[in-house]
C-alpha cells in the first residue's frame, strides 16, 4: 500500500530564509511522487513530480525536491522564501496500477516579513 | 487553455437535504476525478472516470453519494441525503490520460457546509 507522511502541519520561515517541507513515503514498488501547492480558495497546482528519472527534480517558482530512496523521502526545498510562497503544500504518491493519488495531510507554510 | 470549471463555488444546506456539484474538465482530458477534502486533511479520492466509465469508486460512500459522466465530458457528483460529516471542499480534477505520471489539473473546488 502507498502512503505519505508530511512532518509538521505548520511551518514558519522568515522572508529570504530556506524553506524545507518534509515528506516521507511508503510504497511497495518504486513510487511516483508529487508536490502540489494550494493557495486559499483555489484548487491544487502541481509544483513538481518525480517519475524515476533524475532524483533531483526542479519545479516551478524556484522549488525543488530530491528523491532519496534510502530515506524514503521526497522533501521540498526553496533557497529563499518569498511572501507569495505562503500556502498549503501537499505531497502525494501515485498508485502503481493506475493514477490514483494518495495525498499527505498537508503543511501550511507561513512566511514572516 | 481554460482550466477545470466547477460550480457552485459555495453551498450551504441542512442535513438530510440533497446537493449536486458540477465539473467541466479541460477539453480533451479523458480522465476525471472527484476528491473530498475535509478541513485539515489532504484530498481523498471519491471516484475516477475514464471517459464515461468508472475506473475506481472504492472510496465513494455509495449509500448517499453518486456520480456520473454520461457523455464522457462534464460530470455531476450528488449527495443524498447529506450528513454533517459531508462538510468539506469537493475538488474535481482531470488528466489527459490515465497513468501514474500524468499530471492532474484541479478545479477551484466547491465548499459544502452541512448544518
Image (cartoon, rainbow, N blue to C red):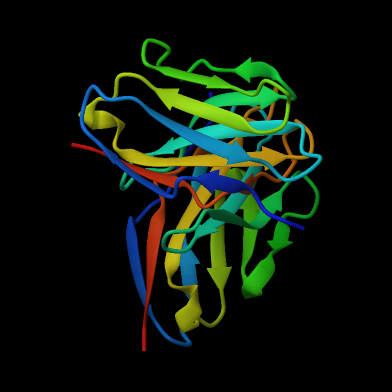
Q: Nearer the viewer, residue B21 or B50?
A: B21
Q: Which residue is at the far left?
A: B115
- The location of residue B101, given as percent across then percent down, is 74, 40
Q: Quadrant of residue A104?
A: top left
- The location of residue A38, given as percent across then percent down, is 49, 58
- The residue sitting at 21% across, 27% down in the picture is B15
- Asked if residue A71 can be seen in this view, the reply is no
- The location of residue A101, given as percent across then percent down, is 58, 35
Q: Quadrant of residue B115?
A: top left
Please indicate whether residue A72 sits to the left or right of residue A104 in the image.
Answer: right
- The residue sitting at 67% across, 57% down in the picture is A48
- The location of residue A70, given as percent across then percent down, is 60, 45
- Asked if residue A88 can be seen in this view, the reply is yes
Please indicate whether residue B14 sits to the left or right of residue A14 in the image.
Answer: left
Q: Is residue B51 above or below residue B91?
A: above
Q: Quadrant of residue B70?
A: top right
Please indicate whether residue A60 sits to the left or right of residue B9 in the image.
Answer: right
Q: Nearer the viewer, residue A54 or A110?
A: A110
- The residue sitting at 63% across, 28% down in the picture is A95
- The residue sitting at 32% across, 62% down in the picture is A10
Q: Which residue is at the far top?
A: B63
Q: Nearer the viewer, residue B38 or B8?
A: B8
Amino acid at each position: 500500500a502507498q502512503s505519505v507522511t508530511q512532518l509538521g502541519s505548520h511551518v514558519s520561515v522568515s522572508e529570504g530564509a530556506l524553506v524545507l517541507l518534509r515528506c516521507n513515503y511508503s510504497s511497495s514498488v518504486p513510487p511516483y511522487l508529487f508536490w502540489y501547492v494550494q493557495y486559499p480558495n483555489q484548487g491544487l497546482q502541481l509544483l513538481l513530480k518525480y517519475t524515476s528519472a533524475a532524483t533531483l527534480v526542479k519545479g516551478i517558482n524556484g522549488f525543488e525536491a530530491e528523491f532519496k530512496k534510502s530515506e524514503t523521502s521526497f522533501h521540498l526545498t526553496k533557497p529563499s522564501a518569498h511572501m507569495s510562497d505562503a500556502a498549503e503544500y501537499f505531497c502525494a504518491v501515485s498508485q502503481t496500477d493506475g493514477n490514483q493519488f494518495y495525498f499527505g495531510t498537508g503543511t501550511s507554510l507561513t512566511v514572516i516579513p | 487553455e481554460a482550466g477545470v470549471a466547477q460550480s457552485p463555488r459555495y453551498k450551504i444546506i441542512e442535513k438530510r437535504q440533497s446537493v449536486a456539484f458540477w465539473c467541466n474538465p479541460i477539453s480533451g482530458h479523458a480522465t476525471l476525478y472527484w476528491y473530498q477534502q475535509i478541513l485539515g486533511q489532504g484530498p481523498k479520492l471519491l471516484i475516477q472516470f475514464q471517459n464515461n466509465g468508472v475506473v475506481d469508486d472504492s472510496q465513494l460512500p455509495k449509500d448517499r453519494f453518486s456520480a456520473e459522466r454520461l457523455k464522457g465530458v462534464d460530470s455531476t457528483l450528488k449527495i443524498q441525503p447529506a450528513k454533517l460529516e459531508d462538510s468539506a471542499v469537493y475538488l474535481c480534477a482531470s488528466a489527459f490520460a490515465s497513468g501514474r505520471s500524468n499530471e492532474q489539473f484541479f478545479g477551484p473546488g466547491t465548499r459544502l457546509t452541512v448544518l
